[in-house]
Image (tube, helix red, strand yellow):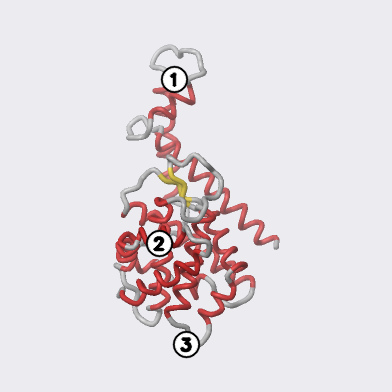
Amino acid sequence: MLRQISEDVRVNLKDRLREVREIIRQSRHDGSGDASILREATSYLPPFPGKGIEGLLSHAASAVDEALSIAEAFVPHERPIKVDGTTVKGLGTYFPVGNEDRQLDAERLFRRDMYYLTKAVLAGLNIDNARIHEADFAAVHATMRKRHGDLLAALAAPGAGLQAIAAACSALLVECLSQRPVRFAETVSETPAVVGSSAPDISCLAPLALACGLATAGSDGAPDPDMLEIAILAADIRHDRIVQACAKANPVAELTPVFATLLAHLP
């Protein structure tokens, strides 16, 4: 229990530090960040003599950003060397059967992979105004184990087929949409989204669930570097159908045949 609490604190701290770092980067004097951030932060201050407080703060932000970049070079990271289809693991890896230590290790791997895979998906969709919360992916992992243990157990059963994989992928997407690990700049509400209400969320998160399903279905072979890109394209083609399924009373049941069809026809 104490280990889990410590892990939760660490993940939330990482999210907050990432947000601070993003604000610093947006405030650099030599960058393309939004200057309105600094103007808003200093609007209540009296006029500053000389160069101006906004210019001084932007140069200070640049210095802090460069110092943090240097510090990062000396700190070991858990990030993947390259983020592509080979980064995705099967659902059996993310949700294994085992003791608490094994579950915690799997949860850590899941949220790390999902964080970097989400960044890759956002880049593929040309979206650069979103924030990713690793803590929300941790919540997705916990909710999957709590609410959908039967679907995860079916994956581990001998002879589990595409239908079982599709059902687990559907549950994963539904829980991701509920926790909203990706927050877009134009999003005003901070409350959990109603499933099916946000097309941008679905565009970003559906490829992740599909990629996990593809990795699960192809666990016996070598991972395909193009699998993530394939998942992005396939989810985009079936976007309207996925949105419709998410809006139903039982989205997991409605999504399962959609994912089953995609898994059956994709390499």
Query: What residue did someone put label 1 on?
Result: 53
Query: What residue did someone put label 3 on?
Result: 159
Query: What residue did someone put label 2 on?
Result: 242
* Residue shown at 70% from the left, 60% from the top: 2
The residues tagged by marks 2 and 1 sit, at their Cα atoms, a distance apart of 49 Å
* Residue shown at 43% from the left, 71% from the top: 89
Of badges 2 and 1, the one in the foreground is: 2
Q: Secondary structure at mark 2?
A: helix
Relative to 223, residue 139 above or below? above
Q: Nearer the viewer, residue 49 or 207?
A: 207
Q: Secondary structure at mark 1?
A: helix
Extreme residue toward the front, this view: 249
Q: Nearer the viewer, residue 60 or 43?
A: 43
The amino acid type found where label 2 is placed reads Ile
In the rendering, at what x and y percent does residue 66 appear? 40, 39
What crowding class fits label 2: few (fewer than 14 Cα within 10 Å), some (14-19), or many (20 or more)? Answer: many
